[in-house]
Image (tube, coloured by chain):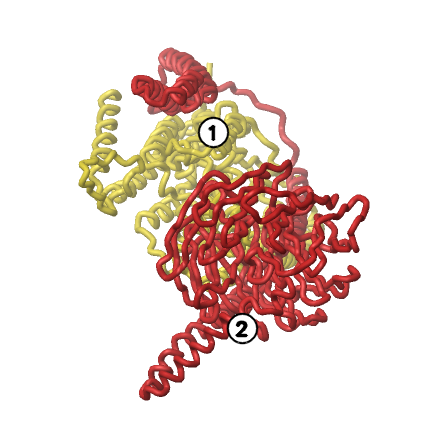
Chain colours: A yellow, B red
Amino acid sequence: MKRKLAIVFLLIIISLQIYNAFAIQRFPKPEFESGHTQPPTITPDPRSNALAILDVFVLVAALSIVSWLVVKKRSRKGVFWMSIFAVLYFGFFREGCVCSVGSLQNITLALFNPEYSIPITVIAFFILPIIYTLFFGRTFCAGVCPLGTLQDIFALRPMPIKSWLEKVLGIIPFIYLGLAVLYAATSTDFVICRYDPFIGFFRLDASFMMFMIGGIFLLIGVFIARPYCRFLCPYGALLNLVSRFSKKHITITPAECIQCRLCEDSCPFGAIDKPVLLKEKEERPIAVRRFVMLSIIIPLLILVGGFTGAQFHENLASVNSKVRLANELLNNTNYGETEQEAFEITAFNAAGQSKEELYNEAASIIRQFYYGGWILGGFIGLVFGLTLVSLSVFKYREDYTPNKGTCLSCARCVDYCPVLPENKVIIQK
Amino acid sequence: MNNNKQIFKVNIQLWKGIAIVAAAFSFIICFLIIANYLQINRLDPVNTEIINTLVERLSQNPNDEALKEEIRELDLLARKAYFTNQWQIRTGGYLLLIGVIIFLIAIQLINSAKKISPEVGEKDDNNLFLQKTARKWVSFGGIGLIIIALFFAFLTHNRLGETFTEAAFAENALNKEATSDETGSIQTPVETSVNETGQTDIEESTEQTTKTIKSSIADYPTAEMKENFPSFRGPGGNGIAYQKNIPVNWDGATRENILWKATVPLHGYNSPVIWGNKLFLSGANGSQRQVYCYDRNTGKLLWTANADNITGSPANAPKVTNDTGHSAPTVTTDGKKVFAIFSTGDVIAFDMNGKRVWAKNLGVPQNHYGYSSSLYVFKDKLIIQYDHRTESKVMALSVESGDIVWSTNRNGKISWASPVIVKTFDRVEILLLTDPFLASYDANTGEELWKIDCLYGEIGPSVAYADGIVYVTNEYASLVAIKIGDNPEKLWETYDYLSDVPSPVATDKYLFLATSYGVVVCHDAKTGDVLWEKEFNNGFYSSPILVEGKIYLLDKQGIMHIFKADKEYISLGEPKLGEKAVSTPAFANGRVYIRADKNLYCIGK
């Protein structure tokens, strides 16, 4: 049966590839009178509409299956096989694009740049995981996201890291999210895609540097599970927020927790909240004083962050290609090239835009970054402030529960729980 | 545990086998890839020993067709092997990836099938402690982030926004000037055509034009210019000086005939120019640009003028190479003002007492070595060859105000040569050389008179002109003699000795050419035949100057080679300055002025 399923799956993949080969060329190929025949192109054609729609259906199906496996069947094995499928389909077959992680930049660009027409597929890839997360927790991260699942396969000897360190590093994705939004909003770059450490593997065309970075991430991932998802992924930061409100999040125990502590260290992502007893509660006057202080500090952090971001705006703007071009032209540095005119300058000259226009445009971009710097800095200040608040709140907890924000719904912990749905306990021999 | 609820059963033995096979497979592939990589790095398909030997044999016997075929086959084989290796590495990479993934899946499945040990570890620190530690590190992290961001922000603050706005404003001003000039030149004929309703007007106009042309012919180079040395390579830049009693003996070491020596404050590869008793030159570095005036009789620095606070001038000077610098163009003077231009595109005019008259920025020239075309004055116009990467043009600015009088676009590449302005048969022409053409422009209107494709490469030497023939040269290209006129034609072309820096100098009969590698050649001006050639120990960057029937040619070590401008090489002296020099000397009656590496020398008796 399994073999038959595998054959059917392979046939589907092959037939889709054949369909892809008939995709319409955007530009007709030139014909040569000399009889020269065109060699086949190496770069894949853009995905046809049919395939794009199929991708959305596959995404819905994958999200549904993984959510079912996680919430209903509580099957780690099932999630694992879905991870393999996600790596193969969303990773290698779709070459990792468009992915939900990067799609937040498309959404931002569409919001800030009315000239950009965003494809419906991209919206679907952005929205669907968020909707599923709102209902079932981060099941997208568990077995659908090709970046996460690839790292998951490499998590062979995961080691726990200190929970305070987890909290500190957990701020980075929010900073990355802010930066990605700023760069997308100013039409500067899609930094998440440019510095995606795994896309090169999926397309088998990584530059040496990106291949090394991806390799290092995977190597680290052997011992520190999913480092990119936990400490960098900006889409994960969004899902972290959404998942806190999820309706049917995975639970470690299917019935009442018996406090056996077997699951205590089962999560490779440190996403299990341990019981917090009343005796660990801070004295009321100290807690009140801290909250009063925080209520003053948070606006201050937003202001200081905004000021810092605004001062840093030139450094942020230097990534923008137009700012860079204007700078190179103004200083006659030719991108450091001495042998020949830099391609960027040749392209600028050929485009026919005047220098005056370019300089004005660059000045306008710098202004955008100045205001963007204020907002980004303020946002980062707010993140730091709210993190401090979350670290000052006392939450009484009796049972071992997954942290709804950071739990990736991988279902590893369920295998550690000896409780059955009928509230019986399995005794291992 | 609840393993019995699993919907997927794992056959551990099978997956163990798969893991072993995948690991072995990956290891072998990895080994092969490394071996292949080392091999591919060691081989250079186009530079193998055997092919090189065969090519050498072929050079001795160029008509050996069998040998040629053998080389082709071997070359093809070597290239095929190289590309096969590359294919093997790429394919190996894919196989390795597949092997590693299968291995990892197998290990994961084996791990997951293992029974979970019901061990419970020691309990962690309490929640309060964890929260406190986390708060501390979050605070440290935030403060650190702010300090780093502010440090870099203040360290790299460049006022980019303001700089771009100012640059856009400067571009706008420049465009407006150019547009108004173009509009002016377009409007003139329209106004004329309105006036041309009466025959008298046409005749008057024609008469006036003829007078202007005659006046131009009679005026250039003017007697005043000839009495002085107002620009790079003399009046008009043709490499001819009109002074007399020039010394042929001096010695820098013993100070024999060295009348004075003065240190120039800022370095520059430009050459001195002279008007009356004043000598001018310029110097610059990345942050300062200056023009100097010396008393040419005493060597006293009369004034130093800064070229700063110029609207549109870039905040940072463009990058230039050390052998060009920021002040390669030589200044020029009309006896009333002195004009200078720098690598930034700043043009500035001072009166003879160093007071600024006007200054403007032409836009930073896009030039990877640095801008180096020298300035010239034609009547009331300052002529600027502005051939750089993004645009290429020749323009005339009003000497009084700096306003653009005319500007003509050229479709050439960057040129490091300088204009040469000469009186031809019936007009005064500005001769400009760039890759790929030599073009002539009317000095009064800027109109392109003729043009001929003749050279290529990075053009350094300016042209030489004599008796209706222009001589152009560039290293790795050729030396071409071109008969000027509305339909210019190549008279002869040679490839033996070519110059990349020094400009040639010509008489009616001979053409003298110096090279940066030390060879000096004399050609028959009409036929191109080599009349003599002489190799010197040192190369030349300085251009030869013809004065009193003698050629003065300064080598890089500061030795002046003085020889007769004749069909035979007759040396008249080789006086040594004792300091390296690349600038071209200036001449006054009885005097030679040389800008050496650090000092300015006055030589005379």
- For the residue labelled by badge 2, is the local secondary structure a helix, a strand or a loop? loop
Q: Position of residue B567 (x, y in %)?
A: 54, 45
Task: Judge left or right: residue B519 versus residue B248.
Answer: left
Q: Which mark is residue B403?
A: 2
Dot in front, 2 or 1: 2
Label 1, residues with CA under 10 Å away: few <14, some 14-19, many ≥20 = many
Is residue B24 placed above or below A229 in the rendered structure? above
**Chain of the residue where label 1 is placed in the rendered structure:** A
Q: What's the amino acid at mark 1?
A: Cys
The disc label shown at residue B210, or none: none
- Tell how many labels: 2
User: Is B566 or A177 nearer to us in this picture?
Assistant: B566
Residue at the location (57% across, 36% down)?
A275
In the rendering, at what x and y percent does residue A256 appear?
47, 33
At 68% across and 38% down in the image, what residue appears?
B129
Visible residue check, residue B171: yes
Task: Give the residue type at disc 2.
Answer: Asp
Task: Give the Cα separation between the discs numbered 2 and 1.
Answer: 80 Å
Indicate left or right for A229 with A380 as reference.
left
Say which residue appears at 54% left-offset and 53% top-offset. Answer: A332
Q: Is residue A146 left or right of residue B242?
A: left
| Chain letter belonging to callout 2 | B
> Mark 1 highlights which residue?
A413
**Disc 1 element:** helix
* Horizontal side, residue A76 vs residue B120: left or right: left
Q: Neighbour class for label 2 at 10 Å: few (<14), some, many (≥20)?
A: some
Image quadrant occupied by the N terminus of chain B? top left
Q: Quadrant of the C terminus of chain B?
A: bottom right
Q: Find residue B467 and report its horizontal and vertical position in percent.
A: 47, 57
